[in-house]
């Protein structure tokens, strides 16, 4: 029934609308945030219109993407954003705007380690694939015990290089440890007490010219939410390979996030990408997927194109 389908769609995709100047809050009960879209502007004259003159709400052809929402929230369980000045520029001067963020909660492991400690990452099944990493501070409560307030005030503290060393240390391994210190990561906010926050997947990993299988239980189907054919570190699938085939670590041939297949499938790296993303580099295929009940796969795909119709009627 329509209402049942609507309920399923709403549980898969969350939409948060926040008037300009207010705080936007995203959260996941399980998994981590994966922002699907984030915009600032106005596409409706009714939203965030209370107390506003018609001249500030009549322009409904106003929209701009807000990359900062992706950067600050992806990979976190909870995220708070002050929308004041969050958009890269004003898309429609004189119009009162609002922020619209669509996100889903995807399965991922998380690790938070206070400065000076060690992060221990482990996969019982599959290999570690780092999703996000930040050495800094994005809230006032994490790793705050016993710390003076002046060391907790900057919640917009992001390291410029955290992802690279964590990926290099952990990608493709069953377990790893990372030291949370400024000797490993650039100090992004001097005087602030920092912590290392990591989100990661336990991925299926297939080296070039090899074959592997993805499996889900009976009654479920595979939904691949991210995958790459290429190379993002020098250690994964490196045994017996010359350094020249491992040096390039920014090699990507990303798939779409809408792949759904039956309860099991076999992956062969032959012909995975329409063209070789980095000729001469020995590549591998990493797959992050979830198992969803059979019958919900169509709804999962459908929501990406039709959610705006449903949200307008809720």
Image (cartoon, rainbow, N blue to C red):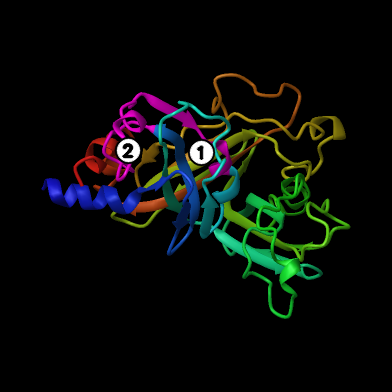
Q: Which residues are magenta?
A: 42-70
| Residue closest to the eye, 128 or 103 | 103
Q: CA distance from mark 2 to mark 1?
A: 22 Å
> Is residue 62 found inside the magenta-colored segment of the image?
yes
Q: Which residue is mark 1?
A: 267
> Is residue 59 found inside the magenta-colored segment of the image?
yes
| x then y, percent, for residue 252 | 64, 30
Give the number of the disc on residue 122: none
| Residue closest to the eye, 33 or 82 | 82
| x then y, percent, for residue 144 | 68, 73
In this rendering, the label closer to the viewer, 2 or 1: 2
| Residue closest to the eye, 61 or 178 | 61
For the point 54% across and 45% down, the residue is 84
Q: Is residue 140 left or right of 26 when viewed as pictured?
A: right
Q: Secondary structure at mark 1?
A: strand
For the point 45% across and 40% down, the residue is 36
Classify residue 300 by image quadrant: top left
| Residue closest to the eye, 98 or 112 | 98
- Image height check: is 257 above or below 94? below
For the point 83% across and 57% down, the residue is 190
Q: Earlier in the sequence, mark 2 or mark 1?
A: 1
Q: Which residue is mark 2?
A: 301
Q: Residue furthest right?
A: 183
Q: Is residue 169 left or right of 264 when viewed as pictured?
A: right
Classify residue 246 by image quadrant: top right
């Amino acid at each position: 029934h329509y209402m049942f389908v609507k309920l399923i769609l709403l549980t898969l995709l969350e939409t948060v609308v926040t008037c300009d100047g207010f705080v936007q809050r995203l959260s996941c009960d399980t998994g981590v945030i994966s922002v699907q879209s984030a915009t600032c502007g106005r596409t409706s004259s009714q939203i965030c219109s209370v107390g506003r003159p018609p001249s500030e709400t009549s322009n409904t052809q106003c929209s701009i993407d807000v990359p900062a929402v992706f950067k600050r929230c992806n990979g976190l369980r909870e995220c708070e954003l002050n929308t004041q000045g969050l958009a890269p520029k004003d898309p429609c001067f004189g119009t009162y705007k609002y922020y619209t963020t669509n996100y889903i909660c995807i399965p991922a492991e998380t690790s938070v380690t206070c400065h000076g400690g060690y992060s221990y990452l482990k996969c019982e099944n599959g290999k570690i694939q780092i999703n996000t990493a930040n050495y800094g501070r994005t809230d006032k409560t994490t790793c705050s015990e016993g710390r003076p307030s002046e060391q907790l005030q900057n919640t917009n503290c992001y390291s410029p290089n955290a992802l690279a060393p964590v990926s290099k240390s952990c990608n493709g391994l069953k377990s790893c440890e990372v030291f949370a210190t400024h000797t490993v990561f650039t100090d992004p906010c001097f005087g602030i007490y920092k912590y290392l926050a990591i989100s990661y997947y336990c991925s299926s990993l297939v080296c070039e010219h090899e074959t592997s299988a993805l499996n889900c239980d009976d009654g479920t189907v595979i939904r691949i939410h991210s995958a790459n054919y290429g190379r993002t570190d020098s250690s994964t699938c490196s045994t017996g390979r010359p350094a020249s085939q491992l040096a390039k670590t920014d090699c990507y041939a990303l798939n779409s996030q809408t792949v759904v297949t039956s309860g099991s499938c076999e992956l062969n790296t032959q012909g995975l990408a329409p063209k070789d993303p980095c000729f001469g580099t020995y590549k591998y295929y990493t797959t992050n997927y979830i198992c969803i009940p059979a019958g919900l796969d169509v709804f999962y795909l459908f929501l990406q194109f039709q959610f705006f119709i449903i949200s307008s009627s809720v």
